[in-house]
Amino acid sequence: MHIAVNGAGGRMGRELIRAIVHHQQLSLTGACVRPGSAALGRDAGANAGLDAIGVKITATAEQAFAKAQAIIDFSAPAASLACADYAARHGLVHIIGTTGFSPEEEGHLRRCAEKTAIVQSGNMSLGVNLLAALVQQAAKALQHDFDIEILEMHHRDKIDAPSGTALLLAESAAKGRATDWQKNAIYDRHGAKGARPAGAIGFASLRGGTIIGEHSVIFAGPGEHITLSHSAERRDIFAAGALAAALWAQNKPHGLYAMRDVLGLAQYKESKQAKRGE
């Protein structure tokens, strides 16, 4: 399968390129970065710490994606939307690991998914997506006697907060309780905020050092609490998940998919009718 990487100059972009080069079923045919990137014009392999592979990094989608069957995209929301438009026009699989989309941008991605297969996830790792399934199950079983708090920590350079993974976990918890996490989210507790509202989902975001990703979901009840957590030790776990998603989506119908679809977590998967709003 021919793969192009968007955001090729970043940490995850370089990790993806290394994973693709060493993968038996995949080949790198293009690499794209934002205009002005220090990686622009370099060989994609050499930029990722490998031998040169003959694929130059470009800022032009038409050059980077011309030979691709799939785009794997860990970049920024505006760049991901441009990739989604290109993928929809040309029928390319689009794997999105970018986070920080607004509700309007999420709607744009859903419209693009009417024309091609998109797999979008705030976290591509197997462990995190299994954690999300467990969080959904726990939230359903414990119900409203247990308050839900989500704690996440990442490296000092991460831009968005809460992390995409924290939002994924909040969505899973809300599904377990058949509620809307966005209407119940609390992001700021500075000052005298009063008592904790019933049904709230609280977020705490920490930033520092080189931490790849730490996530915990705390269910705090009367006289006891339960913590479900995940620690990412290497970035290659996210790359491996993204490559698995690309292979899985290769012959799938148009639609917006999640990693739970890729992993076959059927008991937590929405029906295609529900996804289309039927």
Image (cartoon, rainbow, N blue to C red):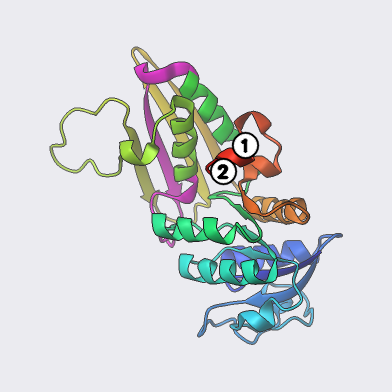
Give the answer, above or below, for where 36 lies relative to 152. below
Residue flagged by tag 2: what amino acid is it? Lys
Q: Which residue is mark 1?
A: 271
Q: Judging from the image, what secondary structure is the residue with disc 1 in?
A: loop
Q: CA distance from mark 2 to mark 1?
A: 6 Å
Span colored in magenta: 141-165
The structure residue drawn at horizontal position 39% and vertical position 36%, both measured from the top left corner, is 180
- Residue 234 magenta-drawn? no
* Nearer to me, 81 or 173: 81
Give the answer, above or below, for where 217 lies relative to 67. above
- Coordinates of residue 111 in the picture (x, y in percent): 53, 59
Q: Which residue is mark 2?
A: 275
* Quadrant hosting residue 156: bottom left
| Image label count | 2
* Nearer to me, 225 or 180: 180
Is residue 160 at least partly visible in the picture? no
The structure residue drawn at horizontal position 46% and vertical position 56%, both measured from the top left corner, is 107
Quarter of the figure that contains the C terminus = top right
- Coordinates of residue 85 in the picture (x, y in percent): 57, 69
Q: Are marks 2 and 1 in contact (CB under 8 Å)?
A: yes
In the rendered view, does 213 fall on the left or right side of 40?
left
* Quadrant hosting residue 5: bottom right
Residue that extends furthest to the bottom in the rendered view of this protein? 41
Residue flagged by tag 1: what amino acid is it? Ser
